[in-house]
Image: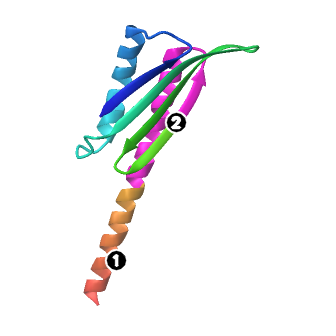
Amino acid sequence: MNTTVKWTNATANAQVESYLDERMKAVEKLIDESESEALCRVELAHESSKHGESWRAEITLSAGGQKFRVEQSDTTINAAIDAVKDEIMRQLRTGKNKRMSAVRKGGAAIKKMLRR
């Protein structure tokens, strides 16, 4: 999986990037091995407003002809990364479950036709 990181309103930090790589390993496990050309774009942004400062993490993942996009904000960058990782993993699991259900239904339909 190719991962690119974009920093907005902040400077690149090796410690944060290693933390991100560690979290993205869990996401890689959910992607099929055949999807070696999966692209993952991560944007980490520092935002200031009258309500205080926050960090925004955004992941756009293209794998297997599907696109997944998640955006989360939190008070610390590590919390934002954790939140976005949890959400993208939820989306990947849901998509995988839907594909498996379709395969099972198709197999059941073929079996039913063969029995007739």
Residue 54, picture quadrant: top right
**What residue is at 29 percent from the left and 78 percent from the top?**
110
Compared to 62, does 79 lie above or below? above
Quadrant of the image for the N terminus? top left
Compared to 2, does 10 lie above or below? above
Q: Residues within 10 Å of mark 2 (few under 14, many from 20)?
A: some
Residue 63, picture quadrant: top left
Q: Specify the segment rendered in magenta.
A: 70-97
**What residue is at 74 percent from the left and 15 percent from the top?**
51
**What residue is at 38 percent from the left and 61 percent from the top?**
101
Numbered badge on residue 84: none
Numbered badge on residue 109: 1
Q: In this orientation, which residue lies closer to the viewer: 22 or 55?
A: 55
Relative side of 62 to 48, left or right: left
Q: Position of residue 99 (x, y in %)?
A: 38, 57
Q: In this orientation, which residue lies closer to the viewer: 73 or 9?
A: 9
Q: Secondary structure at mark 1?
A: helix
Query: Along the polypeptide, which appears first: circle 1 or circle 2?
Result: 2
